[in-house]
Amino acid sequence: MNKLNITYHPDYDIPVPTNHRFVGSKFSDLFDYLQKQSYFSHCEITQPQKANEVRLQRSQSSSYIKKVKEDNLSKEDIRKINLPWSNRLKERSFLAIEGTLNAAKQALQTGIACHVGGGTHHAHYSHGYGFCVFNDLAYTAINLIEEGYVKSILILDLDVHQGDGTIDICQNYPSIYTCSIHSESNFPFEKKQGWMDVAIPAGSGDDFYFSQLQKTLENIKHRISPDIVLYDAGVDVFSEDGLGNLEVTREGIIKRDEIVLKHFNTRNIPVATVIGGGYSSDTEELASRHAIIFNVAARIYKIL
Ligand SMILES: [Zn+2]
């Protein structure tokens, strides 16, 4: 019987004012939602430890880590992160990056693993940005390589926003391939040059999105065979998302995740998924949207 490995920690939620764009309860909302799914009894849940400093220093500067640890971020640092600073936010930042690494290690064993968190792709080497304190994708990719788990990694980032921080941090690692399909006119307004970037015009809708996705997966296939894929399945591509401006439907997100997981499953390349961005004042709708990648993973990998 196949099991689906899910990484989650009950301390992922953060306190934010109710009118804030970021839904502070979205991690526990999603985990609650997953527990109601028929495949949940076939899921193996693990909780990450806090990231250790040796690993963290490979992807974030020592001075920035120190400022986070000692609650010593400047007003400008906190303005860039755009979340109210709290002990909980600090603690979760150390937990969630290790969560993505944990999921990746599990994916290497079983072919698929999903993180109820992650996708903090705007965090740069020495500062946070856009709701992101530390970068879990860069942390995971760099540590998998440094610790000899893999030789090459694809970070496939389908969040509506470009993972500018991931590109910046990973640029000195030639065997970490960053591929982003994002809205050309959403945040961040200064786009970085990653390994493969596809900018989609606002309001394009499902069909154009799929044609770009298929073309991109073919391009990747012709160029690399990574040992693992870190898949940022951000759901802010949704037409009714509070921040994204691509008009992808809910059915479109399901199809997107099916295309991606089937593609790499057929190629026998393990995939670790992170939830990425998703914004809505309707917390139940948001949880169900973030659950799509888990539902699709359970179906494709036959978690029965
Ligand atoms: Zn996003």
Image (spheres, rainbow, N blue to C red):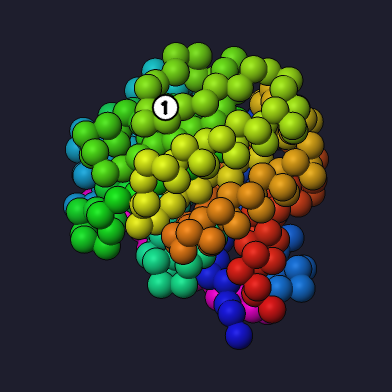
Q: Which residue lies furthest to the front in this view?
A: 222
Residue 283: x, y in percent? Answer: 76, 44
Question: Which residue is drawn at the image coordinates 70% and 28% (left, top)?
Answer: 208
- Kindly identify the amino acid type of the residue bearing the numbered disc 1: Asp
Q: Which residue lies furthest to the bottom in this view?
A: 1
Q: Is residue 292 left or right of residue 10?
A: right
Q: Residue 52: within the magenta?
A: yes
Between 258 and 46, which is closer to the camera in this rendering?
258
Image: magenta residue range = 41-53
How crowded pointer 1 is (Cα within 10 Å; few <14, some 14-19, many 20+) is rated as many
Residue 37: x, y in percent? Answer: 76, 68
Q: Residue 244: within the magenta?
A: no
Q: Does the residue labelled 1 lie within 8 Å of ligand 1?
A: no
Q: In which quarter of the image is the N terminus?
A: bottom right
The reply to whether residue 143 is in sight is no
Tell me: residue 184, above or below residue 230: above
Tell me: residue 80, above or below residue 133: above
Residue 36: x, y in percent? Answer: 77, 68
Quickly name the residue at label 1. 164
Q: In this view, does 112 lie to the left or right of 125?
A: right
The reply to whether residue 146 is in sight is yes
Question: Which residue is drawn at the image coordinates 21% and 44% (left, top)?
Answer: 57
Under tag 1, what secondary structure? Answer: helix
Q: How many labels does the image show?
A: 1
Q: In this view, does 94 lie to the left or right of 297?
A: left
| Quarter where residue 235 is shown | top right
Between 2 and 98, which is closer to the camera in this rendering?
2
Tell me: residue 56, above or below residue 199: below
Q: Quadrant of the C terminus?
A: bottom right
